[in-house]
Image (tube, rainbow, N blue to C red):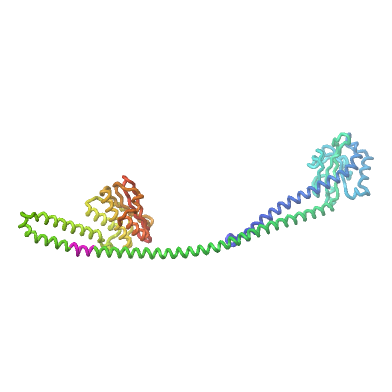
Amino acid sequence: MQETWSRLSLAAQFVVTGSVVLLMGMAVIGIWVTDRIEEGVTRNSASSTALYMESFVAPLIGELTSSNELSPATRRSLDELLTNNELGRRVISFKIWKEEGLIAYSSHAEIIGQRFPTTPNLLAAWQGEVTAEFDTLEDEEDARERDRGLPLLEMYSPIRERHTGRIFAVAEFYATAETLNKNLLVANLQSWLVVALVTLMMLGALSGIVLRGSRTIKQQQIALEGRVNELSDLLDQNKLLSERLQRSSQRTTEINESYLRRISADLHDGPAQMLSLALLRLDALEPLFDKASGESGQESEVQVVRGALTEAITEIRDICTGLTLPVLDDLSPKRLLNHVANAHMRRTQSEVVVDIQSVPETLEKSIKICIYRFVQETLSNAYRHAGGHDQKLSCSYENGLLEVSVSDSGPGFAEAQGDFQSTGLGLPGLRERIESLGGRLRIHSHPDKGSRILMQYRIEGSEH
């Protein structure tokens, strides 16, 4: 049912819902209007008939002001009121009531002198109101009129003393209501037709407005779906391009490391070997300088040259060591982190606390290279700028997110200055390298509060 409803257009949903609501409203309004029409017509008919009857009855029953019974002559006069005249054709019977439900007169002589329960309409008449009921006849004293099987209008009219206005009796009339019944049916039918017509006009007008709005919404929905499809295609293309970019970055990382390895080998086999040869030749020429050392002081110059050559060889070898990566294929991520930390401690003679909480069992080679260079660069920065104080290497892996961080308790720096605005190739290069592989680099540092550099990378499908 819900699925069928959701398939309907907004206009169809409104027509169905609006029809139900308006029909319910039409029913309520129609019932209320017909009740008001019936009540108004009944009251007007009762008032005119009661006034008409009172003009005949009141002069005849004046003796009831001081007595609860009518004389035989008065009864005969009242009986003749409904005999062979126009009034008798309209009013089929009537009763004269006294207090406490006593019937002082009735067209049906057998109930004269009897008492019946006091009805609300009778009480209202004793309070001075003209009341009426149309075709109900449910009271006990209505049995004989009810047996006629005709639609009747039952009316109660107070009878007052001419001079004092005191109510001394109540007259109850039963008038034929065939014409009234037909008039009520016509009035009710007309009222229902008017209410239905107005309801249909309202539904039609509102449906037209909603239909235009629904068409506009439908057009916008179609256009929006087209835009969404275009965006989906663009997102798919961007995803493919991003994957291609990451693959290219991984390949570029491996190629760069290959170039760095070649540069390291060339430096080691080229300039370093030539400088070592020059140092050896200088040692061979040292006796020649010994003869003239007393006169020209050449011995000190030889020592200067030897020191410079030795320092150059050492620096070139350090550079070669920094450029050359270990054999990463044989190292697990955990051993890789320990390896780079140990290499840093050997090179700088400083202490690094290694805290590896968890780490994937395997990683792609490009990610290993990125982690190695990240730890190598950040530990070097910690040693150069923080003097190696409280160096700490941390690693955690949870829910597919790998986090590697290096921290120290050095002087730190303002984050605005540390946001890769340096002119060197360290942190900016790390950020480009990490982000090209889909990771993120974060810096947490404040002056005099140390620094913490964090690398985050989401690993898909890796074993914990």
Q: How many marks?
A: 0
Q: Position of residue 179 (x, y in %)?
A: 84, 53
Pick whichever, 326 or 77, lies toward us: 326
Task: Evaluate whether residue 405 shows in this view.
Answer: yes
Work out whether residue 177 or residue 269 is closer to the camera in this orientation and state it.
Answer: 269
Q: Position of residue 317 (x, y in %)?
A: 20, 59
| Quarter that holds the C terminus | bottom left
Q: Residue at x 37, y 55 (%)?
A: 398
- Residue 114 shows up from this direction: no
Which quarter of the picture shows residue 245? bottom left
Residue 298 part of the magenta segment:
no
- In the image, taking residue 309 as reference, residue 253 lies left or right, namely right
Does the stretch in magenta take in 265? yes
The residue furthest front is: 296
- In the rendered image, the residue lying farthest to the right is 73
Vertical placement of residue 332 versus 172, above or below: below
> At x 67% / y 58%, what residue is drawn?
205
Quadrant in which the N terminus is drawn:
bottom right
Position of residue 111 measured from the top left corner of the image (x, y, whole percent) = 86, 43
Q: Which residue is at the front of the view, 255 or 181? A: 255
- Region in magenta: 264-272
Q: Main secondary structure of the magenta part?
A: helix
**Horizontal relation, residue 382 to residue 289: left or right:** right
The image position of residue 57, as x and y in percent, is: 90, 42
316 lies left or right of 83: left
